[in-house]
């Protein structure tokens, strides 16, 4: 009786072409896997950058709004101290600029908390205007 050889399939029994073929297929599989991971990481990074840009634009608009309101408050104090018409004209210009900034910011608010804070700022600005008139 012949003994069956179950270990016939090993690398020693394959031709050199099959060995190179298996190595080449393995390299392509690894290359495709690495490319997939890198492209997913790049896409995630691009999404994170878009979020960062949107948030930084919003922060810049909020900072500009803060500067406008502080400038308006200084004009109100100047009017209270000196009573000149120049201050009233400056306050009206600042009110228009503040309204434009609030309109820009309203479209960029993403959460209820942000919207509520913007509403509080708008309310305090109206109170400042009412103190003048």
Image (spheres, rainbow, N blue to C red):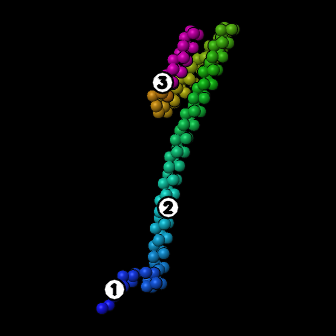
For the residues marked 3 and 2, what is the alpha-carbon distance in whole angstroms? Answer: 44 Å
Q: Residue furthest bottom?
A: 1
Q: Secondary structure at mark 3?
A: helix
The label number, if any, that marks residue 116 in the structure image: 3
Circles 3 and 1 in contact, beta carbons < 8 Å? no
- Range of the magenta residues? 115-133
The label number, if any, that marks residue 35 in the structure image: 2
The quarter in which the C terminus is drawn is: top right
Q: Secondary structure at mark 1?
A: loop
Q: Nearer the viewer, mark 2 or mark 1?
A: 1
Tell me if residue 89 comes above or below residue 45 in the rendering: above
Q: Would residue 74 be found to the left or right of residue 50 on screen?
A: right
Looking at marks 3 and 1 on the same chain, the residue that comes earlier in the sequence is marked by 1
Where is mark 1, residue-wise?
4
Taking depth in this image into account, of 78 and 114 the one nearest to the observer is 114
Residue 103 on the magenta span: no
Circles 2 and 1 in contact, beta carbons < 8 Å? no
Q: Quadrant of residue 15?
A: bottom left
Is residue 76 in view?
Answer: yes
Q: Position of residue 86 (x, y in %)?
A: 66, 14
Taking depth in this image into account, of 85 and 22 the one nearest to the observer is 22
**Count of labels in the image:** 3
Q: Nearer the viewer, mark 3 or mark 1?
A: 1
């Amino acid at each position: 009786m012949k003994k069956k050889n179950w270990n016939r399939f090993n690398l020693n029994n394959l031709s050199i072409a099959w060995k190179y073929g298996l190595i080449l297929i393995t390299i392509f599989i690894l290359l495709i896997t690495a490319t997939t991971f890198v492209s997913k990481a790049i896409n995630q990074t691009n999404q994170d950058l878009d979020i960062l840009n949107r948030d930084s634009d919003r922060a810049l608009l909020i900072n500009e709004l803060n500067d406008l309101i502080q400038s308006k408050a200084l004009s109100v104090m100047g009017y209270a101290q000196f009573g000149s018409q120049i201050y009233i004209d400056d306050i009206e210009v600042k009110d228009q600029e503040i309204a434009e900034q609030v309109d820009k910011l309203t479209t960029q608010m993403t959460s209820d908390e942000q919207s509520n804070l913007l509403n509080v700022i708008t309310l305090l600005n109206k109170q400042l205007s009412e103190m003048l008139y």
